[in-house]
Image (spheres, rainbow, N blue to C red):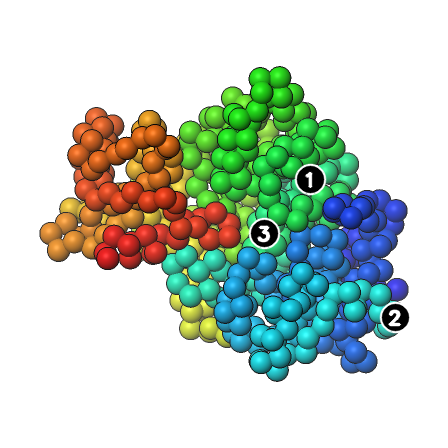
Amino acid sequence: MTESLIPLVARAEQTAPDRIAIADSAGEYSYGQLLEKSHAIASALLAGRADLEGRRVAFLVPSSFDYPCVQWGIWRAGGTAVPLCTMHPPAEWSYVLEDSGAEIVVAHAEFADKLAPVAERLGCRFLRCEDIRDHALGALPAVEADRAAMLIYTSGTTSKPKGVVTTHKILSWQIRSLIEAWGWVPDDRTLLVLPLHHLHGILNVLSCALWAGATCEMAPRFDAEETWAGIQSGRLTLFMAVPTVYARLVKAWESASPGKQQALSAACRKLRLMVCGSAALPVVTLERWREISGHTLLERYGMTELGMALSNPLNGARLPGFVGQALPYVEVRLVDETLNAVPDGTPGQIQVKGPTVFREYWQRPSETEKAFVEGWFKTGDVAVRENGSFRILGRESVDIIKTGGYKVSALEIEDELRNHEAIEQCAVVGVEDPEWGERVAAAVVVKEGNSLSLDTLRAWAKERLAIYKVPSRLLILPELPRNAMGKVVKPELAQQFRA
């Protein structure tokens, strides 16, 4: 076997080949099988060439053993992996294929018929998983660690999605940081219920498990009852998800019989770690989950451009609403508009530096340049540091509302509104106003059997929030618009208020 310079593959080559790497609905697969199948797929992708030399290979594969086989196959052939979202419509796939300049497209049978016409229209070479997973093994190139590994597109909640380029070396630093901080070991076993076009599922769950020589169970999609069954099985040692997943697990627990509730809670307590991220975790969800599971969810902060940057401790106090301190190998600072460091308790923009930060925005040199200052990546997020721990206030563009001369955190208002007995879900945005600059506007989903008016909401909120934080606009919706990771798409909400 050709020695690989790809760190994640090299780690797998050092693992006992019969150890279980992946489990899915069809069975369990060893590290040896992962290396063999990814070698076969790499050989098919090369098709006689010596090296893909960084060419982009887009792939649409559900959460299953096939996913890491295709991902690693792309890497081992010398290509750049471009994961597509299984929940996106063809128009979204077309955007990513065109923007990335993908030369090859690989699809699982479940999606092949829908994706093939898109690939063919754009002149991409189209391959089906089932046709390449058993390809004859051929020679593989030596792939340098500084070569591009992935091109992941941002969620696009505030602008058109941008391709974020991460090298194998950067990816390895991102993984090492989490392995060290969260204590991953070969005996760990995790359950993956997250989408695999986003860094949370790809990095925090799948890549960390495979780097550690652990086992990753891959569910085809999130289902609350099946997830609870996985937790109750006793196989798992850690679990990572987004706030909406935990909220749905809470609902499923609350609908269970008292006896089953007791059994589910007891199963949770056997896990060593439960993590939450990708969106702000409501304090009410954190507290309810702690009551049910005995776990104080470990909140962390990261983004596509830098992996994870901040984390609450594995061992130690975890404060509701806080995302902890800088992770290993990561430097974090808070600055004002003039790049001066802000004191504790004063809001500032989060900036990050270190070997975990991305290389560039794909084919956007000016945007890449604007994203950095003095070597620091400008996240666009605002936080305060209190007693050494960071608390996220939100995105400068959508979560920081400038009203009547005050800067207000939408996330803070949302956390308070969730305590209202009639509110099931909520999101707060700023809506342009000639007098106030922006008005605080709340969109809510009301609990079944309840009603809510702006006057009653304002009267309730005035007893709990400063007057300039109290919503002056209210929109009742059947559901909030969310992306695949469960994040509320706030520009869409703002547009609804304007309409």
Amino acid type shown at disc 3:
Pro
Secondary element at tag 1:
strand
**Marks 1 and 3, the one that precedes in the sequence:** 1
Q: Which residue is mark 3?
A: 195
Point out the image quarter for the N terminus: bottom right
x and y percentages locating residue 462 in the rendered image: 20, 30
Q: Are marks 2 and 3 in contact (CB under 8 Å)?
A: no
In x, y percent, where is residue 127? 72, 72
Could you tell me which residue is drawn at 52 percent across and 56 percent down?
Answer: 304
Can residue 349 be seen here? The reply is no
- Dot in front, 1 or 3: 3
Q: Which residue is located at x 69 percent, y 63 percent?
A: 108
For this view, does 393 lie left or right of residue 52? left
Quickly name the residue at label 1. 190
Q: Residue at x 58, y 80 (%)?
A: 122
Q: Which residue is mark 2?
A: 136
**Classed neighbour count for the residue bearing mark 3: other residues with Cα under 10 Å, few (<14), some (14–19), many (≥20):** many
Q: Is residue 70 left or right of residue 475?
A: right
Query: Is residue 130 shown to the viewer in this render?
Result: yes
